[in-house]
Amino acid sequence: MSNHFDRLMHGNELGIILRYILTENEGRRLMAKMKSGDIGSDRGADKIRDIEVTLDFTPNADASVLYRQGETMVLACATVAPSLPRWFPRDANRGWVHAEYSLLPGSTDSRFQRERRGAKGRTQEIERLVARSLRGAIDLEALGPIAITVDCDVLNADGGTRCASITAASIAMRLCVRRLIASGRCLPADKRLSHDQIKSGMEAPTLSAEEALAHENAVIPYDLAAISVGLIDGDVYTDLDYILDSNADVDMNVVMTADGKFVEVQGTGEEFTYTREELDALLDAATAGVTSLNEMQVRVLDGIE
């Protein structure tokens, strides 16, 4: 076997094998692009897909959002836990935000198998991303000793499910916090009741409209949103659906707060490299896209209690 290997290393067969490998890899790449479909679209490269938001889609959750971005649909439900996680100190004065993510079986073109034994792999990575992102946008000290879980269930997947989940989860989290404040369960530190006062039946103080708004903005200073961007044949595209994502030479998921700060940037060259100038162009496109999403979030929740 070693003699055969030596002969390959010193003969023309090595070049033949290398050419075969390169040709085969290129063929696989081209086939993948062929299968992904035509990227032609009436939507401009810098435009976000149409968005529809339905609040309180599921009435049992403390806040819920049915979020549709193009053909990607996510149901985000925020619920308040009866207590903080067990690993929190008993006298903790700060809160916690957790998130879970899942693709429902009928969300993809072939049935997605339920993960009955817990999240793993891609699912676990995404739900950690969603949770990290939400915690990056909320002041846990201002929230107080409250635990919120945001569940993101993808009803239909057509690219950008993690980004859509983060944007929808942010809406659900703010609405949940707004309602906690209105009910007297989330108060500024100087107005919170002690455990003894709560046990004695003392009622929580009522905040004025101005105080409630000020406290909401203290808990969540800025909205959070995420967008996907990509390079296809040197052109920058915003909000990648499945076809665009499949054809992207470089794709990136960007999570930002409304004040222009980054929570997370995930960028990958799909068998390609990219320059600093291209990276800057992608981040500029993502910033513009997130700004549009933040404006949408404000409009959606304007006047909602």
Image (cartoon, helix red, strand yellow):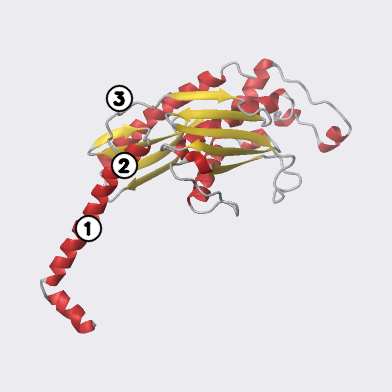
Q: Residue at x 89, y 32 (%)?
A: 200
Give the residue type that dot 2 points to: Ser
> Mark 3 to mark 2: distance in Å?
17 Å
The residue positioned farthest toward the right in the image shown: 200
Mark closest to the chain's N terminus, 3 or 1: 1
Q: Position of residue 70 (x, y in %)?
A: 42, 29
Residue nearest the observer in this picture, 129 or 248:
248
Q: Position of residue 231 (x, y in %)?
A: 28, 39
Which label is found at residue 24?
1
Q: Secondary structure at mark 1?
A: helix
Mark closest to the chain's N terminus, 1 or 2: 1
The residue positioned farthest toward the left in the image shown: 12
Mark closest to the chain's N terminus, 3 or 2: 2
Report the residue marked by disc 2: 36
Residue nearest the observer in this picture, 97 or 54:
54
> Mark 1 to mark 2: distance in Å?
18 Å
Q: Residue at x 36, y 35 (%)?
A: 240
Report the residue marked by disc 3: 42
Picture mark count: 3
